Amino acid sequence: MSGDVHVRFRERLGGRFPGATRLVIVVKGTRAHAETIREACRGFLEGGLKLTLNMEKTHITHVNDGFVFLGHRIIRKRGPRGRMRPVTTIPWEKYRGFAARLTQQLSGNYSMNRMDLLESLNRQIVGWAAFYQYTDYTATLFRRLDRVVFWKFGHWLARKYRRGFRSLMRDHIRAPEPGRAKTWVMQGQNSRGWYGAVALRRLVTSRKGRFTWRNPSENPYVHHARRDTPYHRVEI
């Protein structure tokens, strides 16, 4: 739908917030059935809700071909038992974009405090791992990103301190905890005055969640609840 980004809403008495603007409609049938349902939705949105359906962003695709929705690629594949099942994976474009941002950050900023840089990298790695913790087939991309960050951070240290890569590895590569894989472990003081040791996080050791499908007790898009506060009244 148009207006799904850069939209500002103003709360007022009796104001109504619009529902979700990014939807996936699953159709069990032919492409003609899907096109009919799309036209019916378009008529409801434009006629009843006075919203414009962006036809350039509204695609009809087969689940076996997959599609990207909210940063996840959803596709139906054959599982280990031979049955077809839908899975969610990390889009290749998201992987390349994240790797490019980390590479750019480690390609300069040689005057930056190394502890601040390491903390910044860890925050991004932890956030990315949490966002994709319920996706399938993450091991390959996680290992690739770990290699990129490991070597880029090592070269950043070598450029900053004008030291050889091997000598840096002898001083700073070790296991942060017993039983953990070796990684960069830096000790020093950050710009906020905190002194201690920080280890470079690895995506392959991040938490992996298990997605469990739950059917809602009622349709959240047709349920209307009124909330009254001393400041404003909003119908959702």
Image (spheres, rainbow, N blue to C red):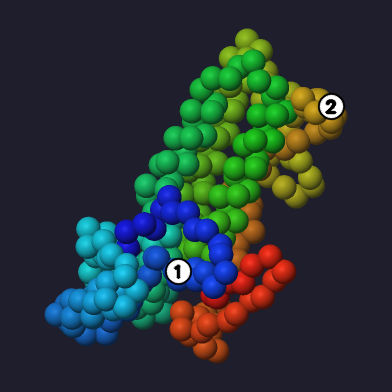
118 lies left or right of 92: right
The amino acid beneath tag 1 is: Pro
Q: Nearer the viewer, residue 192 or 223?
A: 223
Residue 210 showing in the rendered view: no
Q: Residue at the left extreme?
A: 32
State whether residue 187 is above or below residue 87. above
Q: Count residues near mark 2 (Cα–Cα under 10 Å), then give few for <14, some for 14-19, many for 20+.
A: few
- Precedes in sequence: disc 1 or disc 2: 1
On screen, residue 192 above or below 162: below
Q: Which residue shows up at 72% across the image and 28% down it?
A: 115
Left or right, 60 with respect to 170, comes to: left
Q: Nearer the viewer, residue 80 or 221?
A: 221
Above or below, 190 relative to 39: above
Marks 1 and 2 in Cβ contact (< 8 Å): no
Q: Position of residue 103 (x, y in %)?
A: 49, 30
The residue wearing badge 1 is 18
Can you see residue 117? yes
Q: Position of residue 33 (x, y in %)?
A: 18, 83
Q: Secondary structure at mark 2?
A: loop
Mark 2 highlights which residue?
193
